Amino acid sequence: MKILIIEDEIGIANFLKQGLEEENFEVFVAYDGQSGIEIALKQKVNIILLDWVLPKITGIEVCKLIRKTDTKTPIIFLTAKDTVQETIEGLKAGANDYIKKPFSFDELVERIKIHFRDENLNQELHLGNITINKLQHQITVDNREVVLTHREFELLFYLIKNKGNVCTRTQIIEDVWDIHFEYDTGVIDVFMNAIRKKLNLSKEQELIKTIRGVGYIAND
């Protein structure tokens, strides 16, 4: 699991990084708001720990900017701001949680685990007669189990998770393949053909439509 720390106090940031790495998390650190946004957009992190008072861009603005493109990644404010109004302001900006400094590291770890647990509860998704469970790495179609390769599984899960939204080939390459440079996106079509064949999806069902020249969309 990947955690992004956006914290300008180097001592606190390094303390959190070391402690969380000892808890077997992969940790990224940004020391100002602008760098934090850049890392958040490049890295597919599972949770963001965000300070309120930051150089260049405040934590509130960072939270709002991240939420424009990412509505799901949990954001936890770590801040000395402690009034009710400030707490409300942080939550309205899009934060999921709020921990006041100074805080217990053990409490922080438990809060993080709660958000990961809540995320995992949503790892079984449905699309028409398809059920996909990420935790068990299992797919069934009308209760018939279907075996996909790892990459096929990740691609199908991504499309179903974003059900109702068009997923461009560039987005898929970046989010599923984790490739952030120019790459032949035609490989996605090869994987989609394999997925459709294994799931025995007829064109009439149109559960996963091809948007010519753009990408794909999953719809019930």
Image (cartoon, helix red, strand yellow):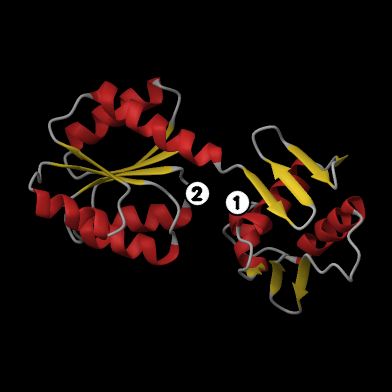
Residue at left 73%, top 79%? 213
Which is more toward the observer, 97 or 26? Answer: 97
x and y, in percent, of residue 122 in the image: 56, 43
The reply to whether callout 2 and callout 1 are in contact (CB within 8 Å) is: yes
- Quickly name the residue at label 1: 178
**Residue type indicated by callout 2:** Lys
Residue 140, percent from left and from top: 81, 43
- The residue nearer to you, when weighing 177 against 94, is 94
Q: Which mark is residue 44?
A: 2
Query: Residue reaching furthest left?
Result: 83
Q: Secondary structure at mark 1?
A: loop
Q: Is residue 122 left or right of residue 38?
A: right
Residue 127 quadrant: bottom right
Neighbor class of circle 1 (other Cα within 10 Å; few <14, some 14-19, many 20+) is few
- Quarter occupied by the C terminus: bottom right
Can the viewer see residue 104?
Answer: yes
The answer to whether residue 53 of the structure is visible from this angle is no
Residue 85 drawn above or below residue 217: above
Query: What mark, if any, has residue 21 been given in the picture?
Result: none
- Label 2 Cα crowd, 10 Å radius (few <14 / some 14-19 / many 20+): some
Q: Residue at x 70, y 71 (%)?
A: 215
Disc nearest the viewer among 2 and 1: 2
Is 55 on the left or on the right of 109, as rendered?
left
Query: Image point 88% across, 60% down: which residue?
Result: 201
Residue type highlighted by circle 1 = Asp
Q: Residue 212 appears at what percent x and percent y? A: 76, 79
> What is the C-alpha distance between the residues marked 2 and 1?
8 Å
